[in-house]
Each structure stands twice: as structure tokens, then as C-alpha cells.
Amino acid sequence: MSGNKNILSIQQRHTEKKLYLRYLIYKLENITKNMDLQQLLNKWGIKCDVNTLLSMWNESHRHYHNLNHLNDLLDMINENQSKYSQNEYEKLILTALFHDCVYDPMRNDNEEKSAEFFIECLTDKSNSELLEVKQMILDTKTHQPNTKLSESFINYDMSIVERNFEDLLEWEKGIREEYKSYGEEYKEGRLKFLESLLDKYPNNTENLLRLVDWVKENY
């Protein structure tokens, strides 16, 4: 009898997961003005099931680099769609979908692995526009853009740094949870990174300094 209960429990969790993914697809497509994300992938010759892609973003070890982050990016890209041609807009959407699809906090090659996964999905691996998307994914590692379009994406990706203290603190707690395996080493590395942002984002110095102080006091 207990075996049947276990089977039912597994089936229920599987059903709930499928329903949750359907909801996420609906939400993402609503953000992108009801664009069918699978059709977008198909249009560009990208052989990847959108459910598989979203499942990658939904891994349990993600606490900031997750579907909320992806939703946030797509929302910003959509709000600024009028600034771009249709091709540019779609390349930004593709970059958002793939730029953190591979994410392991214990590795330092996530951008490269994400770019590799993207290329593996391509029907035409020599398509210059899709190679631009690959480079935009790689640019997110250093936040040094190679094109104006890449600069736009990096600005969206790093927009959290220019937000209020409450948002910065939520960001910090998510990153900390992802990197908790580093133990005490996290604090030193994180402070170095946050302090490097002060000159790059002078309009938000006060909130960033508050975050630096919070990290010093709480870790």
C-alpha cells in the first residue's frame, strides 16, 4: 500500500512540475507580447524544446539566476522594443533565454558552457546573426560589450545594480545562497566585486555603499 502511495506522490509532483512549466511559458510569452517562444526558436533554426530550456532555469540551486531573473530581463527588453529592429529585438530575446541556461556556482565557465549549449542547438552554426548572439552571451562574463546591441543587453542584465537598497539586498541574498558552499571565502570575493561597482555606477553609490556595509556586518 505504501508503495502505491509513493508512486502517486511521484506522479503528483511530476504533474505539478508540468503545470508550473506551462504557467511559466504562459507568463514569458505574455511578457513578450504573446510571442510563441517555441516558434521563435524554430524560426531561427534553434533545435531546443522550450520546456527543456525553462527547466534549466528552474534548477533548485538557482536563487537569483533563475526564472525570475529571466522574466525581469524579458520584461525590460519588451518595454524597450521600439528602440530596435525586429531582428535585434529577437536576438536580445534569444540572448536572454540562453545567457545563463547553464549555471553552476562552483564553476567559472558558465557563460562559455551556455554559449556552447546555444551553438549545439543551432541548425546553421555559421549564421552570422546567431554567432552574434553567442558573443553576446560570452560578453556577459566580463560585462564588456563587443557591439551596441550587446551593450544594451548587458545594461539590462546588470540593471539590478542601479536599483534601490531593498532590491539590492534581495539580489545579495540570492547570490549568497547560490555561493554558500564557498563559506568564508564568499565575503572577501563579494566585497571586492561590489566595491568594483562603485565607480561604474556612480548614480547609485549610496545604495551600493549601504550594501557593502551590510555584507561586512552580516557575514
Image: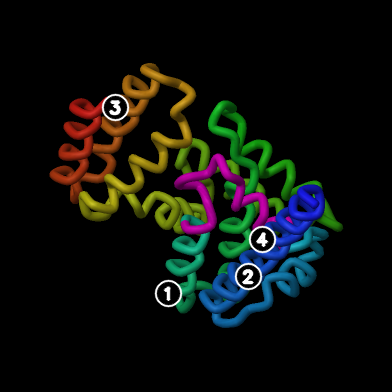
With 192 as the anchor, is 210 left or right in this view?
left
Q: Which residue is at the far front? A: 1
User: Do the numbered discs 2 and 3 sit on residues whose CB atoms are within 8 Å?
Assistant: no
Please indicate whether residue 184 sits to the left or right of residue 125 in the image. Answer: left
Q: Nearer the viewer, mark 4 or mark 2?
A: 4
State the SS at label 3: helix
Q: Earlier in the sequence, mark 4 or mark 2?
A: 4
Q: Is residue 90 above or below residue 8?
A: below
Between the C-alphas of marks 4 and 3, the distance is 37 Å
Give the extent of the magenta segment.
51-68
Kindly indicate whether the residue at mark 2 contacts the one at mark 1 (C-beta within 8 angstroms).
no
| Residue at the disc numbered 2 | 25
Q: Amino acid at mark 2?
A: Ile
Amino acid at dot 3:
Leu
- What is the distance, in whole Å, between disc 1 and disc 2 at their CAs? 19 Å
Can residue 126 be seen at all in this image of the molecule? no
Q: Which mark is residue 17?
A: 4
- In primary-sequence order, the first of circles 4 and 1 is 4
Q: Position of residue 199 (x, y in %)?
A: 23, 37
Q: Residue at x 20, y 48 (%)?
A: 204
Residue at position x 75%, y 74% from top? 39
Does residue 110 appear anywhere in the picture? yes
CB atoms of marks 4 and 1 within 8 Å: no
Residue 116 drawn in magenta? no
According to the picture, the residue beneath numbered tag 3 turns out to be: 191
Rendered view: 137 above or below 127: above
Q: Amino acid at mark 4?
A: Lys
Q: Position of residue 212 (x, y in %)?
A: 21, 33
Q: Nearer the viewer, residue 59 or 163?
A: 59
